[in-house]
Structures are given as structure tokens and as C-alpha cells.
Amino acid sequence: MTDLRQTDASPDDDTIDDAPGSATYRIDAATFTAPRLAPGLHVVATPIGRLADVSLRALETLAGADTIACEDTRVTRVLLERYGIRNRLVSYNDHNAAERRPRLLAALDEGKAVALVSDAGTPLVSDPGFKLVGEVIAAGHRVIPVPGPSAMLAALVASGLPSDAFLFAGFLSPKSEARRHRLEALARVPATLIFYESPHRLADCLADAVAVLGPERPAAMARELTKTFEEIVRAPLGALAETFAARSVKGEVVVVIGPPAEETTSAADVDAMLRAALARQAPGKAVAEVARLTGFDRKALYERAMALKSGGGEPPR
Ligand code: SAM
């Protein structure tokens, strides 16, 4: 075994090894025997497009499990066939989960190893599995993560947007009003926002994002990641919305939006926001909206709203 401590590379080594590559790689011989798995629920991430993205441990787990619970047996079978795995598949999806959970829990009670996969990426991430994991934990069984691909992380790391703090918000509502409401709730979160979106709603989603978050924030649209037609478009939110208002897309899409600029909202800005909100709705709702957008204290905003209504008062702090 190589002892890494014997290399003479300094800890901040930045040299480049530019020996010519052979463009080949090996995975020892051919057929591997999966090790015996620990009893419990193994939550296994699978590729989001390119089958070669599967991890060796995922293959071991899928080969060694007593049962594989998957969203759609036809989809999972493609992955298993690619790697010569023959194993028992049971479907576990939004339509049959309530009926299937007791059966999977019974298998765990018998000391079996059950693997959970979704059609693509990491189970539970906008995919089935949350209730199952909760019940498995409550029943005292192990939950063993087998990490791997997820579209949200692939999109984030290629977006060029800040990755030190991010918030994955799943799918926005297909309805504009609910979508805007959710975006308003997220507007002041000091983190990069990540959304899954269907290609035919992309233009509407971006238009609502511009209406709520403004056109300036840096953003990216990542499509068909790891697949043949992978595409990443990076632009300020307004320009991104214009691009996709004029161009329809196909495939699977992630929208990534950078955090709000770190600027302090001035008292005059708050007054303007309060006046605009008061013109549209009752004071309680107006104050709630401005509190959400600015992060200011509701009580102080309410006092300011009352003062504005009666024509004066100290601005909020
Ligand atoms: N569990 C999956 C994961 O970990 O990424 C997500 C499943 S969710 C039902 C499907 C959504 O994920 C798609 O509508 C799309 O927004 C996103 N997605 C999945 N694969 C993708 C890909 N290859 N490129 C871009 N987005 C993808």
C-alpha cells in the first residue's frame, strides 16, 4: 500500500502531473461478489442520466440487498441490467407507498437488507422515501445512506453561484399565485436558492422569480445534467427570464438563483414598501409582507404603518 506520508509534496502542492494519459481505466477483472449487507434500509443514490455515475458501493448494495424497493421497476431494471445485477424488485411510489410500507417494515423485522432507490438521483430529494425512513427509524431499524448523484448539487456546483450556503426548495407550485408567495417567503434568505422545474413551466417560473426577486440577482438554468444535451446558462435573473420566454426547452431542469445583495434597506425604502403594500391590502397583511421582504421587526413596522396612515412618525430601526 502506498504510504502517502512518504511523498515529498508539500500540503499546498499545486504542481500539475502532465504525463500523457492512456485514456483507459480498469475495474480489476469482471464479476464481483457483493459483500453481505447489514440488515436495515439502505437508501441508495443512482445516476441522474449517465449510468457510469453509479458508485461501486451502490452496485454492491443493489446486488446484495434482499429486496430493492424502487419507484418504477422498468427504470431501475435498466440500471441493473447495465451492471449484470439480477435481484428482486418491488415498486414503491406515490401510488402504493401506504400499502407497501408495512411489507417493507416486515422484511426489516425479519433482519433483511432492503435497498431503496428512486428513478434517478437521491431518494427522498423530491422523491418518495421520507415516510418510509421515518417509520423505519421509529421501528428501531438502521437507515444506511449510500450517497451519490443528485441534480440539485450537480446544478449548484456548475452554476458558479455561491455554494457556502444554499437552500434547496424542491418544486415550486404550478400556480403563479402560490409560486410568488413561496418566492416572497424565500426572498431574504441569505443563501443560493435551488429549484426543480418542469421544462414547460420554466418561462413562467422565471417571470415570477423576476417579479418577486428583481432582475439583478445572478442565476443559472441547468438542463439535462450528465446527459448528451447538457446545458448550463448563466445570467442575471432578468436576462435568463427573457432568454427562456423566447425559447422553449426540453428535458429536466434545475433553476439556481444567487443570494440577495447584502444591502441595508433604507428607512425611505421601507416607507415606500409599506405605502405600496398598504395601498393593496389591510395593514396586518401589508406589514407581514414587508416584514418578510426586509426581515424587519413586525411590531416596529406596524407602528410605522400606523404613523404613515396618519401622516408622520419615526422610521423603523
Ligand atoms: N431525486 C432526484 C435528485 O436527487 O436529483 C430528483 C427527482 S425529481 C422527481 C426530478 C427533477 O429533478 C426533475 O424535474 C429536474 O428538475 C431534476 N433533475 C433530475 N435529473 C436531472 C438532470 N439530469 N438534469 C437536470 N435536472 C434534473
Image: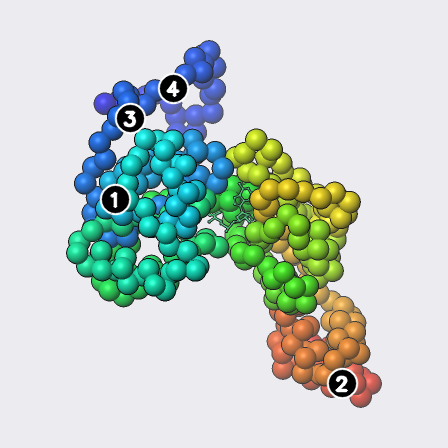
Residue 5 tag number = 3
- Residue at 20% over, 47% down: 38
* Element type where label 4 sits in the image: loop
Is there any visible trace of residue 148 in the rendered image? no
Q: In the picture shown, does residue 203 fall above or below 228?
A: below
The crowding category of the residue bearing disc 4, from other C-alpha atoms within 10 Å (few below 14, some 14 to 19, many at least 20), is few
For the residues carrying marks 2 and 1, which lies nearer the camera in this image? 1
* Residue marked by disc 4: 25
Please provide percent x and percent y for residue 273: 75, 71
State how far apart marks 3 and 2 are (Cα). Answer: 69 Å
* Element type where label 3 sits in the image: helix
Please provide percent x and percent y for residue 268: 78, 70
Please provide percent x and percent y for residue 107: 22, 56
| Numbered disc total | 4
Q: In the rendered structure, which amino acid carries the disc numbered 4? A: Tyr
* Residue marked by disc 1: 65
Residue 307 tag number = 2
Give whichever of discs 3 and 4 has the lower sequence position: 3
For the residues carrying marks 4 and 1, which lies nearer the camera in this image? 1
Q: Quadrant of the N terminus?
A: top left
* Element type where label 2 sits in the image: helix
Give whichever of discs 4 and 2 has the lower sequence position: 4
State how far apart marks 2 and 1 are (Cα). Answer: 67 Å
Is there any visible trace of residue 7 in the rendered image? yes
- Residue at 47% over, 21% down: 15
